[in-house]
Amino acid sequence: MTAVRAADYRGWDALWLERGPLALVLVPQVGGRLMGIRWHGHELAFIHPDLAGRVEDVAAVADVREAKRRLGFPLWGGDKTWLAPQDRWTDEVPFLDLDSGAYETAIGDAGVTMTSPVCRETGIQIERTVALGRDAGNWSVTHVLINRSDAAVTWAPWDVTMLCRPADVWLPTRRYSAYPDGVRAFDHEGESATIRDTVVRRDGDLAAITCREARKFKYGVDADRGVVLAVIDVPGLGPVGLRKEVPADPARAYGHGCVAEVFNASDHDYFEVELHGPLVDLAPGERFTLREEAAVFPFTGVVDL
């Protein structure tokens, strides 16, 4: 069995997975999140200070759409699984059952599995299994989408990790990309179109994105590999690398036309690294699995994707 301890985290009931300098803090009651990523006692993940410890009784909500409009877009923080594409979200906010609902928890040899309620808007149920790796600083997140409805659906798993600034992020680019210099600017996201030359630069066959100021932008790549490296300036530790990777298949369609993305916020002090699985058609009862490998480590100055 996976060694897990239960302890409070910022007012939530949490499960802690710990090995050496790494602690992963799970908060099943808020969207099955990996809410904390702690390295040598320093929190790398962003957690919204005004929402810490808050829980929504989503199961008691009778009208999901009305509740979404009332609650708005709660930026809980941490790492979660969304459904892509975003332009199919209702009310322009994540699906309430999946993003803010309480997940059931099971601890086994494969790690801690958090299982969502069935989404009343999409019929999708999400399983997230978080497990420590063999090496210090390594872990995995296995994302599973299950169609619990009685009709076929099409969605893609979308992993989003909110991290504390300042940081620099590297993404691979595709030689024959559909986007200029291999990078898509999401023009509807803040200043993406106007400040591209300021915050995005080419580093060989990589794109380097600077996330250091409170300016809203989003960029993505249609690369052959679904990998992202963030180098975070951590007070008291110096530069810390956080690398995440999922399998990629450029021959398949992706919800946003990208396998990896970076978002930078203007309202709060965070940025996001985001990884996508392909769009999948799921018949009733079918499931799709995307396994993500992650690692955090002292950054020595060498960018290795």
Image (spheres, grey):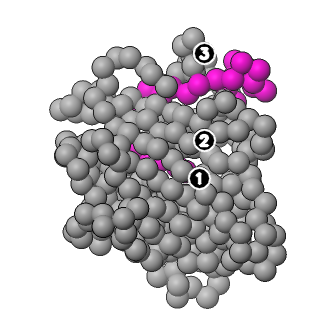
How much space separates mark 2 and mark 1, taking CA atoms? 8 Å
Q: Earlier in the sequence, mark 2 or mark 1?
A: 2
Label 1 SS: strand
Determine whether label 2 and label 1 are within 8 Å by CB.
yes
Label 2 SS: loop
Label for residue 205? 3
Instruction: Give me the residue at 81% from left, 75% from top.
Output: 151
In this view, the residue in front, 163 or 150, is 150
Q: As displayed, is residue 136 above or below residue 27?
A: above
Circle 1 residue: 290
Query: Residue 34 at what x, y percent from top left?
Result: 40, 57
Circle 2 residue: 247
Query: Residue 227 at what x, y percent from top left?
Result: 54, 34
Image quarter where the N terminus lies is bottom left
Q: Amino acid at mark 1?
A: Leu
How much space separates mark 3 and mark 1, taking CA atoms? 26 Å
Q: Amino acid at mark 3?
A: Asp
Label 3 SS: loop
Write the start and end of the magenta stretch as one range: 159-184
